[in-house]
Amino acid sequence: MNKEVLNRAPSNSPITIHQMSNKSYSKFQEEVSLKYGFIGLKLDKLSLTAEVSEEFHSEILSGNFTLYDYFGVVEPNLNRNGELASYKGQFFNDEKENWYIEYTPVASIKMNKRPLKIEFTPSKVSKKNFLIVFHRMFPYMFNIAISTFHLAYDFERDLSALRVNWPKVMYRPIYKGMKLETMDFGAPKGNYHLTAYNKLKERMDSGDMAEIEIYQQYDNLWRIEYKFYNEGNIKKELKNGLPFLAKIPVYIENFKGLEFNNLGVNEKIYLFALRNKPELFAESDKRTVAKYKKLAESISEVNLNVFFQNALDFVEIFNQEPCLINFFEFMNSMLQGDIPKLTIIRGEQYERYDF
């Protein structure tokens, strides 16, 4: 094996300020389920990039490493000089799980980027396939980075009253009739994106029969999904404990509360505009904007930011034999090219295993 493979890149490993809570998962769940209607936090998407050993390149050319598409085995794409230009496809054949692998050695040199990309959804793959993929891939990989990840917080409550103080007023509400079903925040090509949406409605409309049967048990189910992009930005976020989760105030406004009733008419109008037409504040002076943002926060029913970070101790992955992970421990292991420690959920028992 190439010696470089053994030299994992410590510069990409997160040195986090976040410390794992001493609370048990059951105690944590008991507290937050009553207060927030919280069900669970899932690692919903993960994209890794890496440099690879010469052995990986040779394995593709020799046919010892194969990828698949709808029609079967994918053939390597060679350029006119007979060099391996790219190899893209699914790791497994005839699997419903998405394990997309992309290897672009020629383009990566021109664009100065890592040639290998692995993309999957940790919450929707099996533990068995996770271990198969990374026992096979990690020996080839070094200088690993993370280019994308999504954190999905699920709540058994209607969060259509959720309010997010996103900078630069990047807000896109989506209605179905008169009912708000999705809220999007963030620039399309920015480092961060946040979506809050009616997960129950989305699954009941587009899920298969098995999913519909599962989701029918809920009266309400909303998801708040944080999306992190760009390798350099993610490296900085991981190193500092995901400070972005605390940077943007996320709260549920209590417009029926005593505080709101005591406000003047003009103050109510300004707050309503901030809630429904934030673009109207684009030309307002900073003092006015700051005043009403602070006022909106002061009448909030629940501020979720501290909770968002505390929940990182108990992140769920896998759709079969589900496991709990500490988010930072898991990401650190992936960046080091090591199989993470996994805590298997067995009813009320949580057992730690090293694989």
Image: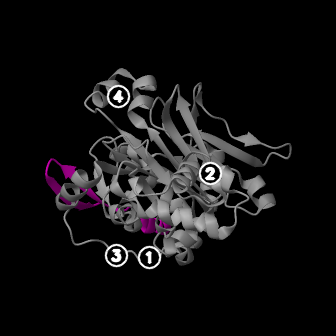
The x and y percentages for residue 123 are: 39, 46
Give the structural element (helix, strand or loop) at label 4. helix
Q: Mark 3 points at which residue?
A: 19
Q: Mark 1 points at which residue?
A: 16
Give the structural element (helix, strand or loop) at label 1. loop
**Mark 2 or 1 closer to N-term?**
1
Residue 211, disc: 4
Q: Give, as a single range, the part of the protein colored magenta.
A: 331-355
The amino acid sitting under disc 2 is Pro
Vertical position of residue 79 compared to residue 137: above or below? above
The x and y percentages for residue 228 are: 55, 57
> Residue shown at 45%/30% (left/top)?
202
> Residue shown at 70%/61% (left/top)?
284
The amino acid sitting under disc 1 is Thr
Q: Mark 2 points at which residue?
A: 278
The amino acid sitting under disc 4 is Glu
